Image (cartoon, rainbow, N blue to C red):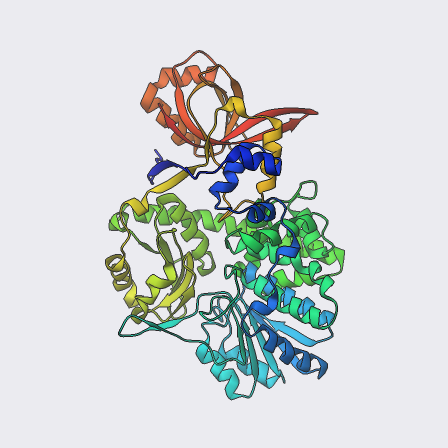
């Protein structure tokens, strides 16, 4: 039998404010005011910006260190028709960064082309083969995007040929730890480095993705060429990258995604139109979910199982028939990726549960036959299962390669920095990282990570933060419609979570061709009834009822007969529209049987 592998602790967000006053002032329900306060939106101006995000709130590109100098430099190169080559990463953020720079440079008449490393042959980011090829093909200036900040040696190599290099990136800056504990940051020897993570960069919001850094560079160039209004044409691509790179949906990230979604729903990009159609989304209003779990993974699959150039070529394609064929191909690649991922996740979980890894606070999982491009996805799924930081490693041409996905209490990049003597290469963020190491260092790496970690047992308990304990009788259409004001949801702007205790389960039935949906009729203590849906592990749900109440009570529930089953639940409300009728319903997120 399957069972829950992680512990949960339900906590109530108890931030205070005069919710009725805020509700009156901004003409919103006091519950909405409370949700906004829970997201640390404090001042009247911040609330106004949050409720009505506008492009006018975006920060000026020139606040980024080296932006003005790089813009002036590029204007000269563009007017001189010097050859510029864009070099990106192969994930969604890299593909979108490349597209934004390429279309932007082409719009202002640059002599420009692009290169994307092959995930298997080249590995991450700019490398010596790419540099040498650029030199031999007469490239004057290389512009990196979503990579470059950790490529000190590769950029020094480019400079040795007399190439000009501009780095645009958003990853953490590598550093050397000094004896006294201070840090010596290692900035690559490029002509200009545009990265908001630099310690002396004055940019007020450093949490942007690589595509947004690229977007800012093009915005600065468009302004110089007197066509700044055209930057809006590129917002949707920054939005896709922002969601798929899982940066915080706060500040200007949220503005870009909100505005980008509006534009995506009527996109003029033929490749995106084809991809939307291939995934049967043309009749839907696109949300951040569709970007992160449908559109993004299709583009990512091109870089994982084939070449990221295919994903970029789809976005650049102007022939509708060719675009439709390409979109179908990347969707099929993604379907294959899903199957391979499921197999990898099963093997990884089995390895943890049947070995001493189960007792580790930081999981290092070795899957020798895993496609290396899937390591990060598998790590993310295993992290969700155990609520622990996870590294998944697999065989590569030179030793082992892999990816990690973290939890909030554990900075992956910082912890890898402490183990760098065992690693061939590493880079990333607090929440995600990539690495390679000699195979013989595997066990030492696992031990060092776990010996170094300061994670406590409390850190490994997943906190379920409840926004509002709200009885289901309070739910109405007006409130549900106002929840739309808070979208898009994602990291840093979580979907609101409501809770109610002691609801009675009147009836339940399993739906879906894969029997993966549970539909309920619930009744609160005040006899208010509402329909509910649950999309979690139904076998575990049923087993817990049987364990708590017995098989007979479970049978009564499934037959819609009187039973004794009650639970505490967290939920999110919505409106179900079917056959012209609108009814209130809730989606159950977490549960505890009473």
Q: Residue at x 52, y 41 (%)?
A: 36
| Nearer to us in this view, 564 or 489 | 489
| Quarter of the figure with residue 365 | bottom left
Total tally of numbered discs in the picture: 0
Q: Residue at x 52, y 62 (%)?
A: 204
Check the picture and name the quadrant holding the C terminus: top left
Compared with 73, 594 (above or below) is: above
Compared with 412, 161 (above or below) is: below
- Could you tell me residue 421's position as x and y percent? 30, 71
| Nearer to us in this view, 362 or 330 | 362
Compared with 407, 574 (above or below) is: above
- Could you tell me residue 250's position as x and y percent? 53, 51
Q: Is residue 482 left or right of residue 120?
A: right
Compared with 29, 131 (above or below) is: below
Q: Is residue 245 left or right of residue 450?
A: right
| Quarter of the figure with residue 234 | bottom right
- Could you tell me residue 103's position as x and y percent? 69, 67
Regarding residue 367, the answer to whether it shows in the image is no
Q: Residue at x 50, y 46 (%)?
A: 42
| Nearer to us in this view, 445 or 234 | 234
Regarding residue 574, the answer to whether it shows in the image is yes
- Could you tell me residue 530's position as x and y percent? 53, 21
Q: Residue at x 66, y 43 (%)?
A: 281
């Amino acid at each position: 039998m399957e069972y829950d592998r992680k512990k949960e602790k339900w906590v109530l967000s108890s931030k205070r404010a005069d919710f009725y006053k805020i509700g009156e002032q901004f003409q919103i329900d006091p519950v909405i005011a409370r949700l906004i306060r829970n997201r640390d939106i404090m001042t009247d101006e911040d609330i106004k910006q949050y409720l009505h995000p506008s492009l006018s709130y975006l920060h000026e590109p020139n606040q980024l260190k080296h932006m003005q100098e790089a813009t002036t430099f590029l204007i000269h190169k563009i007017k001189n028709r010097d050859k510029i080559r864009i070099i990106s990463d192969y994930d969604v953020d890299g593909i979108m960064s490349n597209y934004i720079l390429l279309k932007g440079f082409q719009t202002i008449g640059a002599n420009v082309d692009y290169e994307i490393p092959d995930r298997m042959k080249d590995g991450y980011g700019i490398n010596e083969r790419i540099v040498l090829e650029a030199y031999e093909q007469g490239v004057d200036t290389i512009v990196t995007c979503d990579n470059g900040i950790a490529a000190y040696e590769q950029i020094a190599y480019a400079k040795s040929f007399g190439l000009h290099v501009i780095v645009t990136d958003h990853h953490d800056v590598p550093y050397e730890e000094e004896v006294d504990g201070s840090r010596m940051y290692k900035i690559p020897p490029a002509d200009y480095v545009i990265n908001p993570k630099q310690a002396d960069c004055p940019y007020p919001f450093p949490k942007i993705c690589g595509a947004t850094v690229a977007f800012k560079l093009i915005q600065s160039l468009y302004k110089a060429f007197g066509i700044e209004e055209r930057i809006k044409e590129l917002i949707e691509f920054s939005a896709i990258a922002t969601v798929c790179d899982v940066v915080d949906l706060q500040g200007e990230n949220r503005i870009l995604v909100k505005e980008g979604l509006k534009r995506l729903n009527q996109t003029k990009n033929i490749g995106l139109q084809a991809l939307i159609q291939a995934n049967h989304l043309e009749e839907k209003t696109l949300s951040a979910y569709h970007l992160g779990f449908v559109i993004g993974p299709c583009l990512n699959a091109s870089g994982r199982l084939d070449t990221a150039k295919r994903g970029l070529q789809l976005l650049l394609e102007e022939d509708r028939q060719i675009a439709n064929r390409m979109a179908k191909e990347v969707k099929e690649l993604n379907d294959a990726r899903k199957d391979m991922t499921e197999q990898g996740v099963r093997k990884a979980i089995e390895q943890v549960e049947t070995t001493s890894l189960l007792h580790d606070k930081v999981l290092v999982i070795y899957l020798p036959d895993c496609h290396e491009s899937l390591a990060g996805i598998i790590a993310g799924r295993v992290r969700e299962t155990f609520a622990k930081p996870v590294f998944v490693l697999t065989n590569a041409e030179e030793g082992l390669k892999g990816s990690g996905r973290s939890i909030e209490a554990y900075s992956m990049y910082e912890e890898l920095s402490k183990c760098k003597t065992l690693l061939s290469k590493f880079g990333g963020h607090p929440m995600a990282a990539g690495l390679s190491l000699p195979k013989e260092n595997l066990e030492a790496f696992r031990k060092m990570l776990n010996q170094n970690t300061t994670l406590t047992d409390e850190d490994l308990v997943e906190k379920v933060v409840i926004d509002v304990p709200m009885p289901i009788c309070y739910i109405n259409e007006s409130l549900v419609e106002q929840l739309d004001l808070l979208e898009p949801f994602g990291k840093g702007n979580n979907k609101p979570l409501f809770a109610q205790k002691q609801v009675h389960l009147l009836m339940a039935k399993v739906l879906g061709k894969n029997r993966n949906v549970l539909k309920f009729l619930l009744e609160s203590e005040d006899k208010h009834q509402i329909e509910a849906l649950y999309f979690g592990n139904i076998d575990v749900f049923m087993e817990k009822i049987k364990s708590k109440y017995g098989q007979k009570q479970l049978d009564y529930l499934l037959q819609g007969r009187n039973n004794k089953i009650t639970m505490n639940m967290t939920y999110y409300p919505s409106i179900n529209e079917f056959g012209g009728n609108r009814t209130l319903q809730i989606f159950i997120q977490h549960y505890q049987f009473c």
